[in-house]
Amino acid sequence: MENVHLAVEEDDIYTGYNDYNPTFDTEELDNDVGFQEAVRTSHGRRPPMTAKFPGTATGGRPLASSFGNRMTSSMGRPVTGAVLDGASRPMSAVRAAGFTSSRARGSTFDPLGQSRGPAPALEEKKDDLPEEKIKILEKKVNDLITESCMAQSMGNSQLALEKAKEAERKERALVRQREQSGNVEQINIDLTYAILLNLANQYENNEMYPEALSSYQLIVKNKMFPNAGRLRVNMANIFVKQKNYPKAIKFYRMALDHISDDYKEMRIKIMQNIGTVFVLLGQYSDAITSFEHIMSKSPNIRTGYNLVLCYYATRDGDGMKNAFQKLLSVPLGIDDDDKYISANDDIGSHMLMEAIKNDKLHQMERELKARAEKYVMTAAKLIAPAIEASFAAGFDWCVDMVKSSQYIDLANDLEINKAITYLRQKDFNQAVAILKTFEKKDSRVKSAASTNLSALFFLEKDYEQAERYADLAMIADRYNPGALVNKGNTEFVKQDYVKATEFFKEALRNDSSCTEALRNLGLTYKKLNRLEDALDCFQKLHAILRDSAEVMYQLADTYELLEDPQQAIEWLMQVISVVPNDPKALAKLGDLHDLEGDKSQALHYYCESFRLFPCNMEVIEWLAAYYVQTQLYEKAIQYFERAILVQPSEVRWQLMVASCYRRSGNYQKSLDTYKEIHRKFPENVECLRFLVRLSQDMGLQEVQDYATKLKKVEKMKELREQRVRSAREGSARGRREGSGGSADSGHSSSSNKGERLGAQVMSFPASSEPYESSSPKELDASYVDPLGPLVERPKTGAKVRVDDDDDFADEDLGDELLPE
């Protein structure tokens, strides 16, 4: 309290603020002698005041002093920048501005230190130092590992392996340099591990399995890598690829021992691999043990499906049922699609739902659900015939289980598969009965069932019912390509090809990958003689089905119709490369080479076709005619005898045999053959003529008998021809007169009979033409597409290749069953 002074009431604490200081009087500067002296003596020596060097509070104006050589204000305060005690005073209180209190008097103002000259150059790093060499080499090793991984990600496995090897060599050099420099404790263990692991992976990617196993072995046996034991899984995978299954199981179990229980998911995956290898070994009981353990700990769809397969392999009905129930009870962890429906009319909510409706997560959920449904459907179709006394009872049990599970939508599909199974067993009535029960179901199931019913009635050639159910399928689902294909087929049968093309085109617009619609559209264009459009359809189909011999054959046939035999031959050669034992394709090749004038190639392909299928009359005729033309009658007789076996009631083949004997000079054998023909066909005029001629040439006594028989047969032939002519004339006269009644009907019946008789007489070969070539036949469908609802049957008995596929899709079931 001693230092506390109280203000006296009389004292005015605000006094002095209005006092005028003459120092700040600028009007009297002209009369200030000290100021004027300072201006005259120091103005020329002072540096100019610029904005670059901030001035003092005086604003660049020199202050006058009245104290001799010291510059002071009128109040006695030293002026900023004045010289005090031999040193310049700082212009500000900040020392970083470039001033020091110890600077000599008269020193130049240099805040940036420009008077000291340029800064010395930076000291260069010396690359020859051991530490720098080690750092550079380590960076190169890391860069090589990165380049190796990038090359592998781009699919260049060879380059990735080269980079991995180079990285391994440089890492060894790095370790040696560290040992030489005495920095052994600084060796990067993680870098060594990464290099060895990458090298082993690249060996495995290049299928260099022994080298990969050696690299993995180096990592596993090195105690500096504590978690390397799990790499035994990679080694086991290599043993699986080498089909060394016992050793693979051994290494899987060793890896399982090195992985703690904390890594539950990894242990489950290794157990799955062990079960799969047991399946490959055929040890289904051991596989069941592994899969049952997984289903009890962490069930998943794949393991449940494998468990069903293992029980099916052991024919354990109860096990199959239990495994199927476990498969149905596996939680998918997928929410209902209702969450993607906005609950209110908020625009922001709608935009959010539209954004997430097709994002990556929803796509992954759909794929998981589709895969799970596929496993359930396949398992049900597999075990249904095996778990009960009949497949119908098995399907019923599976349907009941599915209806009580989360896959309730698959129950109707199982019912359709039950109908398909009846169809495979040729029980059409049961199949129709089951499919008709779906007429009152929802649109999707109704469309699938109607599509199958349409196909079924189409197979039975009940085209009215086929068209009716095709219409029902289209009403239920207008975008069902199978229904549209069936509708187009019914229009094709009615020969309304233009309308059929419209339905096939609509099916393609709804599903561009519908191969049935594309193939049938090409066939329809061929019927309309739009060959260029047909060729375009078959070329598109070939782009989808690259190895389909049926499509290649259609391309060859279309090019032949376009009069481009070279292209037709090229496509037929591709057909032969796919199905080398197809007799129809070989015969067609022979025909095309014959048209091109290449008889040797034609003979080769015809002989190959005859070897594979010796009952094709076209091939037999061509070969026999070829050997007749080349006067190799003995070879021709072999093929004519084959024709006799195929068509024993056709007299002309036997006449050909006798003719060959006669032309080869074996008259006795020819005479015996003609006698045998006369015995079988006593009214054959050609046979009697040759018997008369041969008997005359050989001087036989039977000449007169044969001549008498010939005249009698010729007279009978003339009478038949007269009857035919009179019947035709009477029929024509009756039509002109327009008369009716029983007489007209009698004339009509006699006319028809005469026409048939005349046609029968005219079918016999004339003596001037011993060899008749058959008319060319279409070969546009010698291959059968199992998915093609509408194809044309080959006219000859060539073998047909049919592929059997048990995996049916709902919307394509009808297409599977359509006629081939």
Image (cartoon, rainbow, N blue to C red):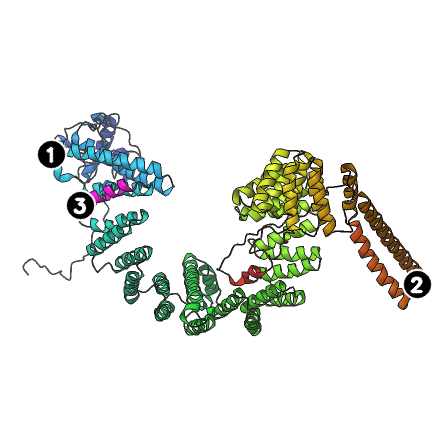
Q: Residue at x 31, y 39 (%)?
A: 148
Q: Position of residue 772 (x, y in %)?
A: 73, 43
Question: First in sequence: mark 3 or mark 2?
Answer: 3
Front tag of 1 and 2: 2
Q: Residue at x 23, y 51 (%)?
A: 230
Find out whether the residues at labels 3 and 2 contact each other: C-beta distance under 8 Å.
no
Q: Which residues are magenta?
A: 207-222
For the C terminus, which image quadrant? Answer: bottom right
Rendered view: 410 above or below 768 = below
Question: First in sequence: mark 1 or mark 2?
Answer: 1
Q: Position of residue 512 (x, y in %)?
A: 57, 53
Amino acid type, residue under disc 3 in the picture:
Lys
Rendered view: 441 above or below 455 = below
Residue tagged 2: 738
Rendered view: 430 above or below 310 = below
Q: Identify the residue at the far front of this view.
A: 701
Q: Position of residue 521 (x, y in %)?
A: 64, 52
Residue tagged 3: 221
Badge 1 element:
loop
Of 626 and 498, which appears nearest the observer? 626
Of 201 and 596, which appears nearest the observer? 596
**10 Å crowding of disc 3: few (<14), some (14-19), many (20+):** few
